[in-house]
Amino acid sequence: MTYLTILIPCLNEADTIESCIKKAQQFINNNDIDAEILVADNGSTDNSKSIALNNKVRVVDVEQKGYGSTLLKGIKKSNGKFVIFADSDDSYDLSKLEPFIQKLKEGYDFVTGNRFKGNIKKGAMPFLHQYFGNPFLSFLGRIFFNNKIGDIHCGIRAFNKDKILNLNLYSQGMEFSIEMIARASFENLNITEVPTDLEKDGRKKNRPHLKTWQDGWRHLVFLLLYTPRWLFYYTGLTFFGTGIILFIITIFGKLDLKFLNISLDIFTLFGGCIFLLVGTQAFTFGILVSHHANKMKIIPLGKKNKDYLLRNLNLNYFFYTSIILFLLGVVGVIVSFSYWSYFDFGEVNIEAMSRIIFPSGTAIAMSIQLAITAFLANFMNIKYNKE
């Protein structure tokens, strides 16, 4: 097996592909390393592919469009035990890969560059990317994935081929860069980063493949989808906790906050009920997503002490809780109708009626949500026997 594959993803990079190949060849020759250069071409319509072939490197065609698709096929077709990939716009110097090789030799499974610790040349990174988008998404990545990666979008990375393929990566687009770090973090691969210089894009005419707002939004959504704890649990608990507070302080009557010159009354109670419903829905969705993602080996549950509740949750308790809430809601509805009948089903005290019917309706709605969650969870656990 070849020791190293230098993988270069390519899509209409005629201006820069030869420079990238020459620098990679220079690195191989200077370090006397057993390596190959592989260009993964994603359907270039210029002469990028012929330039690569003329430079005596192997080219693999990738039919499925997308940055992730190109890299995945390139990784699978590589012959190296280790793989280093870098963007083919000549923004990374492929003649200076020694720091990555050194970290691989030290036993790291995954080495990513960090442009913020290196030197970002003037004009090499758009202002919004450099000072807002990338730092913000990298910050979220450190929180969500519990790692120390400071540049989640760096386009040059080195890794153990087999360990990365074992992650079963699937993203086809630019979000592949985030998925790789997320899955590597979840599987506790030995990860590190090295300072990396970023040169200005060497292309003359072609616009960057990255679309600032569209890809930025997709990356943010992808971050949240890979962290159900933040997307569902914390959000659900926040809504539920707010709802409980609003419910308690208004269920028995109006609350005057004289220092703010406001009064909390029926509408606050109604808002509290809405918050309770949203919180319940978010939390139950999170449970379903977590168990399904863990079962499909997409997102594993966390450490035992961190996700103890999820690991030991008996969904039958959802049935029991839903029955209790439903009965309480029905009792409230009966009381409301009794109160209404006292007035011969005519006009009643809306304030008094609301303080009965709002909580009752909320309890019934929450009971239905919990019951549906329990049924759906049990349905998802059914194993289909083809025989």
Image (cartoon, rainbow, N blue to C red):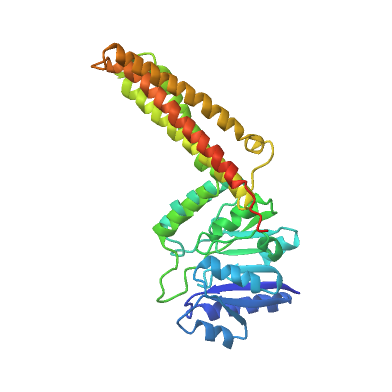
Q: What x and y, as percent, mark residue 69?
A: 55, 68
Direction left: furthest residue: 347
Query: At 41% from the left edge and 71% from the top edge, which residue is drawn?
Result: 207
- Residue 85 vertical position relative to residue 352 in the rendered view, above or below: below
Q: What x and y, as percent, mark residue 173?
A: 50, 63
Write down the quadrant of residue 40 in the picture: bottom right
Residue closer to the observer: 198 or 162: 162
Query: At 62% from the left edge and 54% from the top edge, which residue is drawn?
Result: 183
Direction bottom: furthest residue: 54
Direction top: furthest residue: 342
Q: Is residue 126 visible?
A: yes
Query: At 47% from the left edge and 77% from the top edge, which residue is drawn?
Result: 12
Position of 280 with respect to 385 (left or right) is: left
Q: What x and y, as percent, mark residue 237?
A: 50, 32
Q: Is residue 261 visible?
A: no
Quadrant (top left, top right, bottom left, bottom right) of the N terminus: bottom right
Write down the quadrant of residue 356 in the picture: top left
Position of 136 with respect to 7 (left or right) is: left
- Residue 311 vertical position relative to residue 336 in the rendered view, above or below: below
Quadrant (top left, top right, bottom left, bottom right) of the C terminus: bottom right
Write down the quadrant of residue 249 in the picture: top left
Residue closer to the observer: 269 or 202: 269
Q: What x and y, as percent, mark residue 100?
A: 67, 64
Across the whole image, how many numbered discs are drawn on residues?
Answer: 0
Residue closer to the observer: 196 or 347: 347
- Residue 94 vertical position relative to residue 275 in the rendered view, above or below: below
